[in-house]
Amino acid sequence: MNKETFLYPAIHTKNANFNMWFAFPGPYSFAMSSLGFLWMFKSIDELEDVNVERIYSDTKATHLHRQNINLLGFSFSFDTDFLTIFSMLEHYRIPLKSSDRCDGDPLVFAGGPVVSANPQPYKDFFDFFIIGDGEDVNIEVVNLCRENKNKPKNTILKKLSEIEGVYVPLFGKKEVKKLTKRLSECIYTPILSGGAFFKNTFILEVSRGCANRCGFCLASYLNLPLRFMPYDELINVINLGLTHTNKIALLGAQISAHPHFKDICKYIYEKILGGANIEMSVSSLRVDAITPDVVKTLVAAGQKNSTLAIEAGSERLRRVINKNITEDQIFNAVRIAKDNGLKGLKFYGMIGLPTETEEDLKEIINLAAKLKSEFKGFDISFGFSSFVPKPHTPFQWCGRENTKSLEAKACFVKRELHKLGISATVSSIKWDYWQAVLSRGDETFTDFLIDVYQNGGKIGAFKSAAKARNINTDYYAYADLMLDDNLPWDFIDIQPGKEFLIKEHNRLLNL
């Protein structure tokens, strides 16, 4: 049994007659390092009249009985999560399609980045979706379901469809507004576990969103505007975490842009100088925001390596994707990192970006060679993924390069970096292809996804299912879409809207 420490006053004995499972489509260890999943669970667990239980892909037995479950919510963060979700539904004898479920089955819903961006491929499997930031609406939804638990499902779903940020497929694709929460309270790890992937680590959200707005980045556009947690609130939460563990992690797409990031680091650094044993890590650093004080804090807190996302090797291509950093800034960041005690940096890049040329690829190798030459003894490595078009981004209309071409590029960068003595990893080009298919998928995918799952969920299963269902998956992955096309996810109202994305698409691709 994994020892868990609750950082909130959990109500362990409730006299409630409404039962809910909150599900993570992965093992316990991953779930217990998922900040969003745990915080949503905490908010529901604090309700006195709701019994809620966490379940995972490796849950052996449950405290609540299946026949007594009224509501089942899934966290949906990655495109292929549907495979595990289907497996969990089957395990608990819940029909995959919502239309096949009876009154004795729970209502099933999902939230998270995948379905907030484009729920249409999955619309026949869930009774409803939460679109966007779910902290507040989650409670509203659970309470509504509890208050109406004995009413017909369609009556409950009709009421749910009237809540802002809730999409109920049964009532069609009316406009649904993506929820955006004002950050007034800090989201942090509410339950520490020795069985978590990041063992007994207290994670706290420093910021949400990213002002850089890279043309390909769903995380940036889905979470706009950039919001920062108040400094005093962060310090209070850090102190709460440190009363229970010495491991803390700062989370956010752009944490080093926080107006008080240096002050946060100084606070931690002074605690360490005062004798506190603190291990601190950060999700990533901005090239243009690395300072000696920040690096000294990370090193004092036990971090030996960090990551920098540069995305592309040439300044031209970085401008195209809106990653406006110069080579001088990259070298300055590495110099500060090395001079202040870090042992190495991993650079994240992307191949197959729109307008990429052979020269852009060679620039990655040239940059790596110059870094290797100038910073001898400093560990430099690279990790690459391939471009996947994502909804609600300026590059959502851009098709992927074909798999054969991308695999040749992957071989080239790995081979040339290996010659320099630099390690490099590249994500699976074939899996990235299927991620693109799912990202730009639509409501015709229902039976295709079921076939994929029933055939084992490997790449061969995707291929055979597409062939059997006569789905041209190359269209979803490779096609350059027209700017005036009606896209499956257009009914979701996300700011900035489609007109802005079109302007940004044209601006970036014509630089």
Image: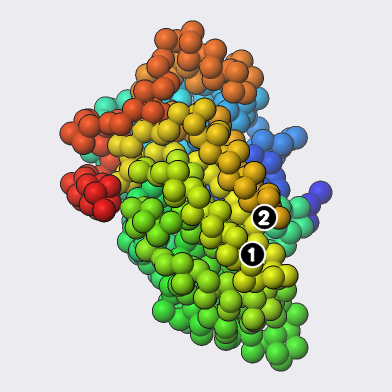
Residue at image mark 2: 420
Residue 182 can be seen in this image: yes
Instruction: Indicate the quadrant where residue 260 lies.
Output: bottom left
Whether pointer 2 and pointer 1 mark residues with C-beta atoms closer than 8 Å, the reply is yes
| Count of marks overlaid on the render | 2
Placement of 30 over or under 211, stated as above or below: above
Placement of 95 over or under 365, stated as above or below: above
Of the numbered discs in the image, which one, if any, rests on residue 124?
A: none
Give the camera-side residue of 179 and 118. 118
Placement of 364 over or under 247, stated as above or below: above
Q: Residue at x 69, y 61 (%)?
A: 192
The residue carrying pointer 2 sits among few (fewer than 14), some (14 to 19) or many (20 or more) residues within 10 Å by Cα, namely few
Secondary structure of residue under mark 2? loop
Question: Relative to 502, is 154 on the left or the right?
Answer: right
Instruction: Indicate the quadrant where residue 149 lies.
Output: top left
Residue 191 can be seen in this image: no
Q: Residue at x 38, y 47 (%)?
A: 216
Give the camera-side residue of 469 and 81. 469
Q: Residue at x 60, y 31 (%)?
A: 84
Question: Relative to 270, is 440 on the left or the right?
Answer: left
- Pinpoint residue 347: horizontal percent, then vertical percent: 57, 58
Residue at image mark 1: 372
- Pinpoint residue 342: horizontal percent, then vertical percent: 67, 74
Question: Relative to 215, is 496 on the left or the right?
Answer: left
Instruction: Indicate the quadrant where residue 81 lies.
Output: top right
Q: Which residue in the rendered view is the most extreme toward the bottom?
A: 274
- Pinpoint residue 32: horizontal percent, then vertical percent: 66, 52
